[in-house]
Amino acid sequence: MGMRRGFHRVWTYVRGAPGTYVWLAVLFVTSVALHRMSPEFEEEFLRQRSTNLHELSDNPVRVLVAGAMWIEGGYWLPYAVLYSVFHAPVERWLGTVRWLVVCGAAHVLATLISEGALLWGIRHGMAPDSAVNTLDVGVSYALAGVVAVLAYRIPVRWRYAYVFVVLLVYGVPLVTGRTFTDLGHFVSVLIGFGCYPLARGRRKVRNPKETAAAGRG
């Protein structure tokens, strides 16, 4: 009985965030595929789906979508935890469409801004010309945006502490490392904070049963 109840709770949680877990399922499949590739083939395969300057100039839409479907290194389990801790609560709270807007804005805008900064660095001799083919795939920009927008779900008495920690986690690497990916992560956080209009008025987490009942009515 206890196992059935636990399974039901897990299923209810998953059903309340369909986009999160469909995306996670896709990442699982692609991660398994990566583990079956040789290191040399994997690098070239991911490079063709990378949101680097070369691929963005040739196939911007394709690589922006494809780049969010692969995890460099294929380590899926940590993302399963992070998606359940951050993406799922935000999707259940904002709804799938608004959650997707946050993810898309963070992923696309942070990619374009960080790659634009890299292009500026190449043109001014601060980065090598070979950086146009840098391997850059993954879901971390969207995750950073979602982590940031979740601040508006945190009770006010804890919100400023949460915002401080988020800025610290993403700001320190930007100051110390100063890579284009560090910039992309920090920009994603700012975009997430900027998504307040999407969060305004969304106080209650959606109940899938209530949604289904409303649809039948």
Image (cartoon, helix red, strand yellow):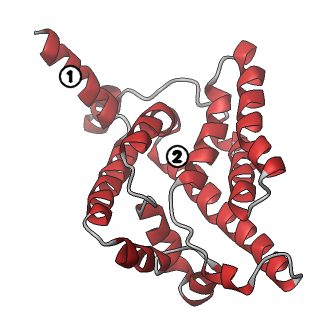
Give residue 111's quadrant in the image.
Answer: bottom right
Residue 128, percent across and down?
75, 81
Who comes first in sequence, dot 1 or dot 2? 1
Give residue 26's quadrant in the image.
Answer: bottom left
- Report the residue at 77% width, 35% height from top: 168
Marks 1 and 2, how far apart in space? 24 Å
Position of residue 180 relative to residue 173, above or below, is below
Amino acid type at circle 2 is Trp
Query: Mark 1, residues whose alpha carbon is within 10 Å: few (<14), some, or many (≥20)?
Result: few
118 sits to left or right of 78: right
- Report the residue at 52% width, 23% height from top: 204
Residue 139, percent across and down?
51, 55
Residue 193, percent across and down?
73, 42
The tag on residue 8 is 1
Position of residue 147 relative to residue 186, above or below, is above
Amino acid type at circle 1 is His
Position of residue 217 relative to residue 177, above or below, is above
The tag on residue 99 is 2
112 or 165: nearer the viewer: 165
146 or 93: nearer the viewer: 146
- Report the residue at 66% width, 17% height from top: 155
Residue that protrudes farthest toward the bottom in the picture: 58
Q: Are marks 1 and 2 in contact (CB under 8 Å)?
A: no
Q: Secondary structure at mark 2?
A: helix
Residue 88, percent across and down?
44, 36
